[in-house]
Amino acid sequence: MPRSPSSPAFWRSPLRGPWFTSVLGVVLLLGITVLFVTGLVSYAAYNPNLSPVNDQTPDKGLLGFYLFSWPTHPSWLYRLTQGVHVTLGIVLIPVLLAKLWSVVPKLFALPPARSLAHALERLSLLLLVGGGLFEFTTGVLNVQLDYIFPGSFYPLHFYGAWVFFAAFLAHAVLKTPLALRNLRHLRDETPVGEGESVSPNPAEPTVSRRGALGVVGGGSLLLLATTAGRSFDGPLRETAVLAPHGGPEPGGGPGGFQINKTAAYAGISPTETGEEAWRLVVTGRAGRSVRLARPQLLQLALHSSALPIACVEGWSTSDQWWRGVRLRDLAALVGHDDPVDVLVESLQRHGAFRRAALRANQVADPRSLLALFVNGEDLTPDHGYPARVIVPAAPGVLNTKWVARMTFGDL
């Protein structure tokens, strides 16, 4: 028996073959394309071209060609796009692992390059495998709130996505015609073509290729059932047992809905949020500035909006009933009759998004509020008391909590 992985006879599984690999490849072709597009959409939602405040990858160069001002309609837009992105990424993990397993003999095949075209194919395969594992691993760690990777998640995942998708696209161009030809023979269990993946001395089969696909599909369905619920409320959320924001709601009452960071985690003390200490500083045209205590904010015109919260980790809440002062009314207080961009700063002292910028179209939306109440009662400390921003369709990190300062103007 050959002991070297470079020998085709080393890999004896009878499941490997063009048909099995092609089915998995077509699923990944569709799924990863959706993942890439929704990932770019998520990056645009952070408005990194708004100003250096939000830009987590300032040296992105041409890779930021598609950025635009994120819309506020419909209010559940980011909840949908990011929920699809994260849930689909998790569901595709068994498919990705099965695909890598099906082609692993090709990674060890010798000689490394038989021609220039073969060398380019091997290089694209290396980038594809490495990039895929990197993207899925960092994505899962981020979803699980385990920030153990070196550096910030945003640039790592962003640059990794471009490298991975470029290799994926090159591989798809090379292999899609062959995969489609193989799929025309769905009933043919006899392996043909692509000799590196087919064992010349296969072991006795214990399951058919269709059975193996059933196992892969079953694993994906299990992950779907145990993660997708965190994008919903009620009984469905309780099925998301593998997600940090799954299971029962964190509490009862008007403030009993999901949060990412508590006031204690952010270092927010009751002393600095009390009525005697806290003041909101609003700055606008020509340095015009006002300082508002919470009772003064309550004397302004108050409005209500039913809006969800959706975060980059893929979890979200249904609509909560927020009440507070419209952002465009605060802009008017400091001389901006027409809505403009705003820089929002939190009492939170650490974190990439303790300062966040919003576009003029987000400020202009009548549903965009500096919220003081939620579901009929004062904000809780964990939900941002004494005041927080809530903007339709904006990622959760841009809905700044524990607001201390707002600066209106072109950013």
Image: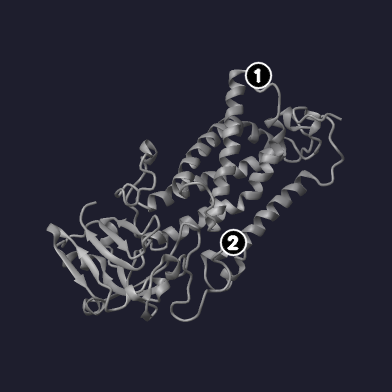
Q: How far apart are the two marked residues, 2 and 1, measured between alpha carbons?
A: 44 Å
Instruction: Say if 18 sits above or below 47 in the image.
Output: above
Query: Vertically, is 362 above or below 9?
Result: below
Residue that badge 1 annotates: 114
Numbered disc 2: secondary structure: helix
Dot 2, crowdedness within 10 Å: few (<14), some or many (≥20)?
many
The residue located at (24%, 75%) in the rendering is 293
| Residue 132 image point, x, y percent | 58, 42
Where residue 355 appears, x then y in whole percent? Answer: 33, 58
Q: Secondary structure at mark 1?
A: loop
The amino acid on which the numbered mark 2 sits, given as a three-letter code, is Thr
Q: Tell me the residue at 81%/47% (across/down).
A: 207
Q: Position of residue 79 (x, y in %)?
A: 45, 61
- Can you say whether 176 is above or below 262 in the image? above
Residue at the disc numbered 2: 227
Residue 64: in sight, yes or no?
yes
Query: Where's residue 112, x and y in %?
Result: 66, 23
Which image quarter: residue 65?
A: top left
Which sits in the foreground, 308 or 173? 308
Q: Please give left or right for residue 362 compared with residue 141 in the image.
A: left
Q: Is residue 163 above or below residue 300?
A: above
**Could one spot residue 372 in this view of the protein?**
no
Q: Nearer the viewer, residue 38 or 315?
A: 315
Task: Please identify the quadrant where the N terminus is shown.
Answer: top right
- Residue type for callout 1: Arg
Q: Residue furthest top?
A: 115
